Amino acid sequence: MAIKTGEQFLEEVKKLTPEVYCMGEKVEDMINHPILKQPLKNMCRTYDAAHDPVTAKYATEESTLIKGEIINRFNGLFTSREALFNRIQYLRLWQNYVAACTYRCPANGLFNALFSITADMDEKNGTNYHGRFVDYLKWCQKNDIFVSGAIMDVRGDRSLPPGKQVDPDMYVRVVEKRKDGIVVRGAKAHQSGSMLAQETLVIPGAVMRTEDEKDYAVSFAVPNGTKGMTYIVQHSFGDDRALVAEDIDLGNVKYGSRFDATALLIFDDVFVPWERVFMCGEYDFTQTLFRRFLPIMRMFEAGCRPGLFDVLIGASMAMAEYNGIARASHVRSKLQRMAYIAQSTYGVAIAGCHFAKEVPGGIYIPDQVYCSTSKITSIDGWYEVAKLAIDITGGLSMSLPSEKDWRHPVAGKFMEKYLRGNPQYSTEERIRMIRLIESLTQGAMGPSLHHGGGPLEAHYTTIRQSLVTEHQKNLAKALAGITDKKSK
């Protein structure tokens, strides 16, 4: 099958029948829902990018599983360092043109981690997970399926492991095994775009360490609309804007806010046939699974953020012109700093690709230390880039009247007169750019960028375990002429 267009994907979404709740109401029409329709445009763009002459070579690749089959890169495997680099190149380019989420990175990371870990489990235990997973991935590639990745459990009391929770459903678990499959129960948090995806691919949400946690060591795939699955859509700060805005007040008028359509996904005794189960009880493999998956996600984050920074740099340049301060030395200094942050983040991500290592199954996993470093750089960098963009924009980044006022015959006349900046540019241009910067720096943007790819402390832990060691201390002692003998 040829790669779909966005319109073809949209027609398939229309046929989905998920149970979705948003703002206290059951959603009957996802296509035209104000919270969901903008993210759906992003998702359609992941298909149209494959047909766009500018992005096609980045958006597609030849399948390593189906000879001669050209597939969407989001459904591909990383069988070389070049494949990793191509992926982050695409992410930066994607953000340049869309400045919003693809909703496909988690599943892409899971494809690679599960392809590898299922081979490991089969070799050790004589299971047949790998064959099942390869069949599933081939089907996804051949039919150009949009898959949502589900990782993070709700976790309950975080001081307790999964098996010690007061409510055992705080992590997704197997509650019944049958001859034809399993039944699962629990919930996954932060599921971006999942109700609009055709499939959901699930892995454990934590490392399971003991035998009594084996029921939580489960990985499976389910189609959208499966009985027992319920989506409860987020209500973040920016969603109120989506309910009333159509054009200027969206900021990003083409694709909306970055992480709209994120939901709490409930599995209420959901049945999964064995052919779609890729782990069931192998708790001793969960740590390795995460060690392979997390560096990939951190690489994605660090490839994505610089593309977003590029847009904020351009928006800040435009705002400086609209405000009449483009030649001010402090503005040039701020723009240079923003560019430095973008390139340093991207450069470390490239290093992660360069030092990638091959694991069983022929998958290349980017270096976890470089990827964690780039992820931290991207988080710290985003806050600084946002601060600088807001500084250049000025106070209207938080006090601009609405588009409805702008369109009003009385209020609009005053806005046209008093909100004009540099007379070389129209008031509307200035208003539009202010809204874009607002949408990229405020609302849910900060928390979503901060937490995407895992909590900050996890990245610092990775770096500390690798680089804050006795080896570093011994290097310093050797140069200082200190022996290993204890000081008296």
Image (cartoon, rainbow, N blue to C red):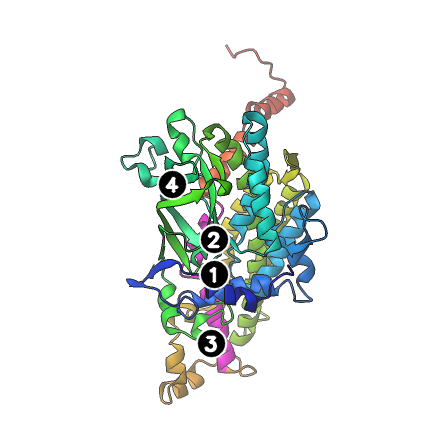
Name the image quarter holding residue 60.
bottom right
Write down the residue under mark 2: 449
Tell me the kind of residue under disc 1: Arg
As measured in the structure, the alpha-carbon distance from the residue carrying label 4 to the one carrying label 1 is 34 Å
346 vs 239: above or below: above
> Could you say which is closer to the camera, residue 308 or residue 390?
308
- Count the numbered circles shown: 4
Identify which residue is drawn at 36% across, 59% down.
20
Are the residues at dot 4 and dot 3 in contact (C-beta closer than 8 Å)?
no
Q: Secondary structure at mark 2?
A: helix
Pick the quarter of the image with the N terminus.
bottom right
> Could you say which is closer to the camera, residue 449 or residue 363?
363
As measured in the structure, the alpha-carbon distance from the residue carrying label 4 to the one carrying label 3 is 52 Å
As measured in the structure, the alpha-carbon distance from the residue carrying label 1 to the one carrying label 2 is 9 Å
Give whichever of discs 3 and 2 has the lower sequence position: 3
Give whichever of discs 1 and 2 has the lower sequence position: 1
Q: Is residue 421 visible?
A: no
- Disc number placed over residue 183 in the picture, else none: 4
